[in-house]
Image (spheres, rainbow, N blue to C red):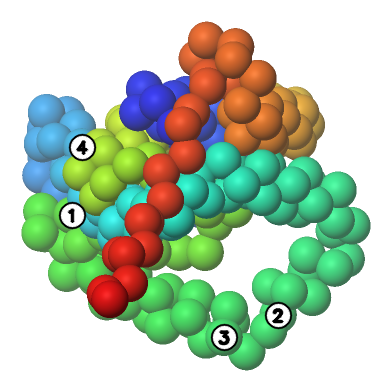
């Protein structure tokens, strides 16, 4: 997966973040009495998110590099595309049931408790930490970004891919932090309607990429790399 596509995934996925992470962003403490200090604090929060995404990208990029050694990179791309399609087409009721599972619920509650602790401290370091924790919250589009990181060739590429993903989310999330209270609710609803269409488009790109059709950038030709077995000794 080309590293620059991480920015596109993050940018369009951040439209989804307005609804999901908007309440967290609007609850961020105001530190300082000048617009410059407030602006700097919001940047620190976003840098915390990007830091977490980069670490996750490195971790899953390393995992993906192991799969590449076995020639599974293209199969993995197709599989992720199918998973994204399945997620988009899954009825909301089933998604809500999944969100009510013990592991999901407990993980979210632990992170939310840490949010409350950090918000009460009202310091620049707490803003960065809130961003770090925000990056760990269960999120469908973060998983899509991680899927792209797994499709890279090594941990460095995976980290760079998710760093680009984080940078893609930066403009919308910063705007939400600064102007979120005046964003029209109807606009949020219209934006949310675009999310499934974007997810389907992204899934199709993953699938095409894995089909090895020889289309530059979209479905390039790859030579499978497999681990050769040593010749038996005689």
Nearer-N-terminus badge (4/1): 4
Q: Between tags 4 and 3, which lies in front?
A: 3
Secondary structure beneath label 4: helix
- What residue did someone put label 1 on? 128
Residue 192 drawn at (x, y percent): 71, 35
- Which residue of the protein is positioned furthest toward the front in this rendering? 234
Q: Which sits in the foreground, 113 or 86?
A: 86
Nearer-N-terminus badge (1/2): 2
Q: How far is the residue under mark 4 from the one under mark 1?
A: 9 Å
- What residue did someone put label 3 on? 103
Q: Which mark is residue 139?
A: none
Q: Between tags 3 and 1, which lies in front?
A: 3
- Residue lying at 57% horizontally and 49% vertically, measured from the top left: 76
Q: Which sits in the foreground, 121 or 62?
A: 62
Secondary structure beneath label 2: loop
- Residue lying at 59% horizontally and 15% vertically, measured from the top left: 214
Residue 64 drawn at (x, y percent): 40, 54
Q: Residue 100 carries which label?
A: 2
Q: Between tags 1 and 2, which lies in front?
A: 2
- What residue did someone put label 4 on? 43
Mark 2 nearby-residue class (10 Å; few <14, some 14–19, many ≥20) = few
Quadrant placement of the C terminus: bottom left
Mark 4 nearby-residue class (10 Å; few <14, some 14–19, many ≥20) = some
Res 82 seen here? yes
Mark 1 nearby-residue class (10 Å; few <14, some 14–19, many ≥20) = many
- Residue lying at 61% horizontally and 35% vertically, measured from the top left: 210
Residue 14 drawn at (x, y percent): 50, 35
């Amino acid at each position: 997966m080309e590293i620059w596509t991480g920015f596109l995934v993050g940018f369009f996925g951040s439209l989804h973040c307005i609804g999901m992470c908007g309440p967290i962003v609007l609850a961020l403490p105001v530190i300082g009495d000048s617009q410059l200090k407030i602006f700097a604090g919001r940047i620190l929060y976003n840098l915390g998110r990007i830091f977490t995404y980069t670490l996750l990208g490195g971790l899953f990029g390393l995992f993906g590099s192991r799969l590449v050694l076995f020639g599974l990179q293209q199969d993995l791309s197709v599989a992720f595309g199918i998973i994204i399609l399945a997620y988009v087409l899954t009825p909301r009721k089933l998604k809500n049931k999944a969100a009510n599972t013990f592991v999901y619920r407990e993980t979210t509650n632990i992170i939310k408790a840490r949010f409350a602790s950090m918000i009460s401290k009202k310091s620049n370091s707490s803003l960065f930490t809130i961003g770090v924790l925000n990056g760990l919250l269960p999120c469908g589009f973060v998983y899509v970004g991680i899927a792209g990181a797994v499709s890279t060739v090594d941990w460095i590429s995976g980290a760079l891919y998710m760093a680009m993903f984080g940078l893609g989310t930066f403009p919308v999330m910063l705007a939400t932090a600064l102007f979120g209270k005046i964003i029209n609710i109807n606009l949020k609803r219209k934006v949310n309607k675009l999310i499934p269409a974007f997810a389907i488009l992204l899934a199709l790109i993953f699938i095409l990429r894995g089909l090895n059709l020889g289309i530059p950038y979209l479905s390039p030709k790859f030579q499978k790399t497999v681990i050769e077995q040593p010749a038996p000794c005689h």
